[in-house]
Image (spheres, helix red, strand yellow):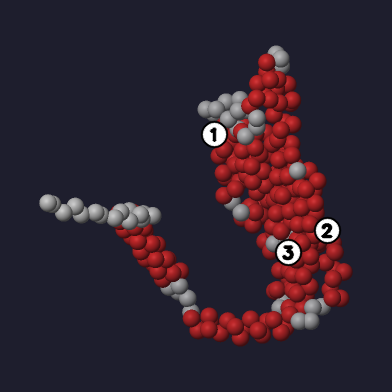
Amino acid sequence: MSEITHYKEVWSHRTPRTRLFMWMGWLGLVALFVWCWQLMTKNTIWAFVQDAPRQASDIGSRMWPPRLSYLPELMQPLWDTINIATIGTIGGVIMAVPIAFMAARNTTPSATILRPIALFIIVASRSINALIWALLLVAIIGPGLLAGIIAIALRSIGFVGKLLYEAIEETDVRQVEAIAATGASEAQILNYGIVPQVMPAFWGISVFRWDINIRESTILGLVGAGGIGLKLQSSLNVLAWPQVTVILLLILATVVFSEWVSAKVRHAII
């Protein structure tokens, strides 16, 4: 009588081949990390790195206590910074709205010509940092608030345009079809079927971008685009560390306040 051998199957989350590929993938990532680390630190002077804690402690001791008497001089630059962010955001939103409608599949007048152009504008705007826009504009139109405002606006086009055109594409098709079934024109379909659906997203995106622009506009002065960054740059140049502390604390308070305003407005809208 032959013996019957029973084999007990053992469940495994992954097959041996999958585990092998995963280990090879992790090994490749480790090798890539080591190679990138060597490439980045090739010219690093490690004596400076070892001395960094002492230097940081020395600068920190010079930054305290902050020179609070310097605070009144920062009110006008702070107001300029807020204006740069606000006006730049408004300009960016105004330019981003038609671009978003041209980029959305369900609202673009031409999917073969206008949509690729709109998508290219969105990508180009998002790929260039506001600081780089400011550098270019300062070289073109000179230093001042105008360069900062335009830099913020150009940077905002890509952010607002991308999120808005995605919101347009996610609109409920049934509402649009219901309005179209009444014999409405394309303009009426857009006005009554799509715009009401994207308005909450539009206001939320705009306020969120304004909050981001408050932060970005604080450093545009480092390249001559106006605002409180000019004061920060001048204080750093003369090593006035107590003044730098006051500026940094003021920037922190402004960002916290803008975050609070942004959260309240988004909560009220959405």
Label annotation for residue 79: 2
Residue for point 52% across, 27% down: 112
Left or right: residue 134 compared with residue 247? left
Q: Which residue is mark 3?
A: 229
Q: Nearer the viewer, residue 26 or 8?
A: 8
Name the residue located 12 percent from the left edge and 51 percent from the top edge: 1
Q: Nearer the viewer, residue 51 or 256?
A: 256
Q: Are marks 1 and 2 in contact (CB under 8 Å)?
A: no
Give amino acid for label 2.
Trp
**SS assignment at label 2:** helix
Per the image, label 3 sits on a secondary structure element best described as helix
- Residue 197: x and y, percent? 71, 33
Instruction: Give the residue type at disc 1.
Output: Pro
State which tag comes first along the sequence, 3 or 1.
1
- Most extreme residue toward the front, as rendered? 1
Q: Is residue 85 visible?
A: no
Above/below status of 25 relative to 189:
below
Foreground residue among 35 and 172: 172
Could you tell me the amino acid type at mark 3?
Gly
Badge 3 vs badge 2, beta-carbon distance below 8 Å: no
Q: Earlier in the sequence, mark 3 or mark 2?
A: 2
Q: How many marks?
A: 3
Residue at x 70%, y 73% (from the top left corner) = 236
Q: Residue at x 39, y 66 (%)?
A: 30
Q: Residues within 10 Å of mark 1 (few under 14, many from 20)?
A: some
Q: CA distance from mark 1 to mark 2?
A: 39 Å
Q: CA distance from mark 3 to mark 2?
A: 12 Å
**Is 80 on the left or on the right of 220, as rendered?**
right
Q: Regarding mark 1 in the picture, which secondary structure is present there?
A: helix
* Marks 1 and 2, the one that precedes in the sequence: 2
What's the mark number on residue 116? 1
